[in-house]
Amino acid sequence: MPSISVIVPVYQAEKFLHRCLDSVARQTFSDWELILVDDGCTDGSPALCDQFAARDGRVRVFHRKKNQGVSEARNLGLNEARGEYVAFLDADDCYEFQTLETLWNLREQSGADAAACGLTYLWPDGRAEVQSQLPAGIYGQAEIREKLVAPLVGDRLTQPVFNGYSVCYLFSTEIIRKNHIVFDGPYLEDELFVLEYFCRARSLAATDQPLYRYFLHGESATHHYMQNFSQVFTRFMERKEALVAEYGLESLRPQWRESSNWAGLLIAVGNEYARDNPKSIRQRQKAVQEFCRRPEMAQAVKALAPSGLSPNKQMVANLVRGKHFFTLTQLYRLKNRI
């Protein structure tokens, strides 16, 4: 029984996979197993996974014939994990070499249910930005609720937004399985998983060291047009409503629905104007207007005036509130060279 199971969903990641796998192989902490879930890849990723497993007995590979998405891949990994704790790693990212050792020792020394670290955003042009999830320290249930759960519930607009990335944590396998916590959906799945886990956790040990390297590139799923975003976001809000009700989170942020819906609306606008959206420019503008007319979105626009956004998002929010959709469309045409 290894101490840590590292779960990596793999889909069309041949270009990045060597870097990812090497970062696990070279960890200063050796008591790990690596679970690679080939999620229906059609590139060279499956062969790379098998080659890596052949060299190291701590590596197990699971091949799927069809792509079922990152949530199902992670859930398969959770079902197969033998480790006392689990960590997640995306195939196009990597760990610092001391990541697992630091998180394990942090949790072991504090007796906490989880450990957290910061991350480094890396752009193709060489830019780098460090972001801490939480200030270093030990958090009890009340502090977790205030510093982590409350922002995930309702602070989804003002910068910096608290990111619910599952890759920045070491989670207890026992807590996950006992409470049947799973990933659900193709987008925003991390946020709900982390939210539910920390509604159950009693303590968290955090370091502000950036131990995760998050690479930003145009091949990420978040940079491509999602045809069914409307349904995906509806499902996300249904699950979030259920979690808020189950754990009594309504009082933490009274306007959490409006904040969450505004965040979804801004994502929807960016999604419609993605470069690879096959719709005409008129169809895109119509789709944005229809999304804004949805009752829950109209209520959010009416009840909450976003502030503290990044300059670009603030401009978008102001144009949406003023119903200046033609101007919004022209700005996106210029920005994305549509």
Image: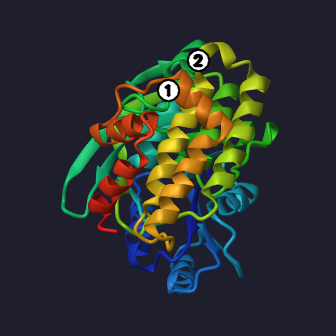
| Whether residue 152 can be seen here | no
Q: Secondary structure at mark 1?
A: loop
Q: Residues within 10 Å of mark 1 (few under 14, many from 20)?
A: some
Is residue 194 rendered to the left or right of residue 314? right
Viewer-nearest residue: 115 or 239: 239
Q: Are marks 1 and 2 in contact (CB under 8 Å)?
A: yes
Quarter of the image for residue 95 reads bottom left
Q: Residue at x 40, y 42 (%)?
A: 324
Q: Position of residue 136 (x, y in %)?
A: 38, 25
Q: Amino acid at mark 2?
A: Arg
In percent of width and height, residue 104 lies at 50, 40
Per the model, the C-alpha gap separating discs 1 and 2 is: 8 Å
Disc 1 or 2, which lies upstream in sequence? 1
- Residue behind mark 1: 155
Disc 2 residue crowd, few under 14, some 14–19, many 20+, Cα 10 Å: some
Q: Position of residue 112 (x, y in %)?
A: 58, 26
306 or 207: nearer the viewer:
306
Q: Nearer the viewer, residue 21 or 293?
A: 293
Q: Quadrant of the C terminus?
A: bottom left
Looking at the rendered structure, the kind of residue marked 1 is Asp
Where residue 185 is drawn, which disc sits there? none
The percent coordinates of residue 204 (x first, y second) are: 54, 26
> Residue at position x 54%, y 49% from top?
289
Q: Which residue is mark 2?
A: 253
| Residue at the spot 59% in from the left edge and 80% down from the top edge | 41
Q: Residue at x 65, y 41 (%)?
A: 294
